[in-house]
Amino acid sequence: MIDFKKEIGKLVSKKFDNLNEDTIIELLEVPPNYELGDYAMPCFRLAKELRKAPNVIAQEIVGSIGKNELFEKIENIGPYINFFINRKTFGETVLKEVFEKKDMFGSTDIGKGKNVTFDFSSPNIAKPFHVGHLRSTVIGNSLYKIYNFLGYNSIGINHLGDWGTQFGKMISAYKRWGDDEALNKEPIKTLQGLYVKFHKEAEKNPELEDEGRLWFKKLEDGDEEAREIWKRFVDLSLDEFNRIYDLLKVEFDYYTGESFYEDKMDRIVDLLKEKNLLVESEGAYVVDLEKYNMPPCIILKSDGTTIYATRDITAAIYRKETYDFAKSIYITDYSQNLHFAQWMKVVELIGYDWAKDIYHAPFGRVSTEEGRLQTRKGNVILLDDVLNKSIEKVRLIIEEKNPNLENKDEVIKMVGIGAVIFNDLSNSKIRDIVFNWDRMLSFEGETGPYVQYTHARANSVLGKAEYDITTDVDYSLLTNDEAANIFRLLYSFQNTIITAMEKNEPSFIARHIIDIAQAFNRFYHECPIIVEDKELQKARLLIVYSVTTVIKTGLGLLGIEAPQKM
RNA sequence: GUACCCAUAGCUCAGUAGGAUAGAGCAACGGCCUUCUAAGCCGUGUGUCCGGGGUUCGAAUCCCUGUGGGUACGCCA
């Protein structure tokens, strides 16, 4: 594609010895509305250096450029120089590129040869998967895909919460009250019930706590019975989680949970000792971080056992050694901000210069109008319920509008689940979410179904087309505002993906494809596509083709499927 | 108490690493299906961009400060 910014840079810098291309490009911006052109160059910053008023500078530059075939108009409005790209050229360069690259349009190889690890989803074994877990899962999954699309080699790691004292308690509870039939039928619910019961009973009968600790000790020591029961819990939970991951179409490269690092922590503790980083404090061993304005990072508890920071440090080192990552990204909610800052600092203090390549990508918390989600208080919204309700609502709509749709069930799932994922990815991830059913199940406007619908509708036009898609069209037929808006959005698609990657923010892509969908729907409304005029039809079809291609790619980057029909 | 995050239309949110009159969606009201999918399109209205200072030619955006909300602050993860 033509790099229009660069072309402007060349044009303007040619006339000024003291202004090079890059400074010009730096100055360029997109005007607040398109009546002011495709690019604008404000001249305020040049005023001092050139000792002239900004609007005079703008005028002079415009005067010096003269006619240029890439731009149909270059004019100054006060201190701004506005560049209007020739629409014929614009359409041609963009549409040809989309047609050539197809589903790779927007990709790059900037990440070639670089590994990036993603630590995401990471649910706790034996606990239900609720809407809170959804966030890490879908954000992580989307980032995984975005990085891959930009040439990186993404490595997805599910850091399962599969270790710790609570498993001793679970085993103890299971030994006392376990019911195998119930466990096989409704594993998570039953395990959850056992956990709750244990805590209730332990209030009356404190020695239960000791029993739980004992079982965990046995588990750590490799006791056969303990291992066997634990393994069963893990497998049952994983079956359940995998069912949800299948629904969401989320995959992981590794399921290395906390237990995986059990035998790898000694080495790290020794390393910390060796580096003289460990100090005793209140019976525990910590790394002092006062210099960095943070509370100490506990490495060994006073009973000598490890803690999650120890595990995270160990896992980071393991991952560096195993995958030699260029970046390592952790997707958790922001309540862990301090924890991440602490252990990342410890990795740095050990002397690993790659500590700077570890990123915490925090997101906001989910609550309900009643307050925060608390499993114990029963204030939980299960992901299953959300997905099911969404799917059911989609089913109603499809039964009404398109009852004879082929692969109906499949499409219903795609849309229902897509709605849930899109809802989670369409806003800045740092924002808290107050869960609301009406909002969740709204399928109009800036929603997943809206984007999917636009795609399906465009796709259906392609099905009715009377000619093959070709780039051999008359681009001068595509110079109306509706078409030009689409060109702008397709043109900037790659840039949006790169920014989404740099900021670990999938919502940029969600916003971008909403914009494309809106622009297309206007085009669709204003410009009939299957028209008698052969040349016009071919030209417009190429736009339709490009839009379906790019929306599909964009949805894909969010982890959402794009049905052909709906 | 300390640190970090958030505060933009009735509601949910954008606002591209300071720029031209602050934008969408939802909700409300009014139009548009004998023509490509009406989950759509078009139109109508609203703003002390939390308050107060400051930096700048220019601030929703940067700095300081106050207020409100969230989160975290040692042996859970």
Image (tube, coloured by chain):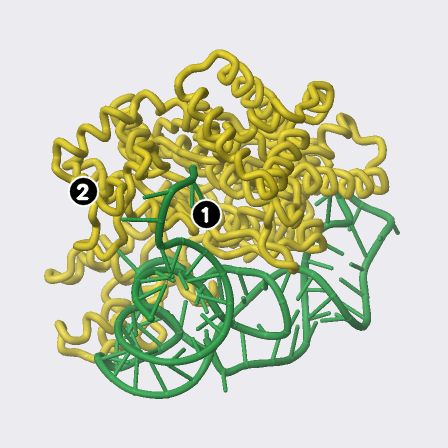
Question: What is the distance, in whole Å, between disc 1 and disc 2 at their CAs?
Answer: 30 Å
Q: Give the residue at x 23% y 59%.
A: A24
Q: Which residue is mark 2?
A: A279
Asked if residue A484 can be seen in this view, the reply is no
Q: Which residue is mark 1?
A: A333
- Say whether disc 1 or disc 2 marks the residue closer to the N-terminus: 2
Q: What is the secondary structure assignment of the residue under circle 1?
A: strand
Q: x, y percentage for residue A336?
A: 40, 48
Q: x, y percentage for residue A316?
A: 30, 32
Q: x, y percentage for residue A327?
A: 30, 35
Chain with green colouring:
B
Tell me, for residue A259, which label it has, or none. none
Image position of A325 with respect to A341: above or below: above
Q: Quadrant of the C terminus of chain A?
A: top right
Image position of A135 with respect to B42: above or below: above
**Amino acid beneath label 2:** Val
Image side of residue A206 versus residue A399, left or right: left
Q: Nearer the viewer, residue A175 or B13?
A: A175
Q: Give the residue at x 27% y 32%.
A: A326
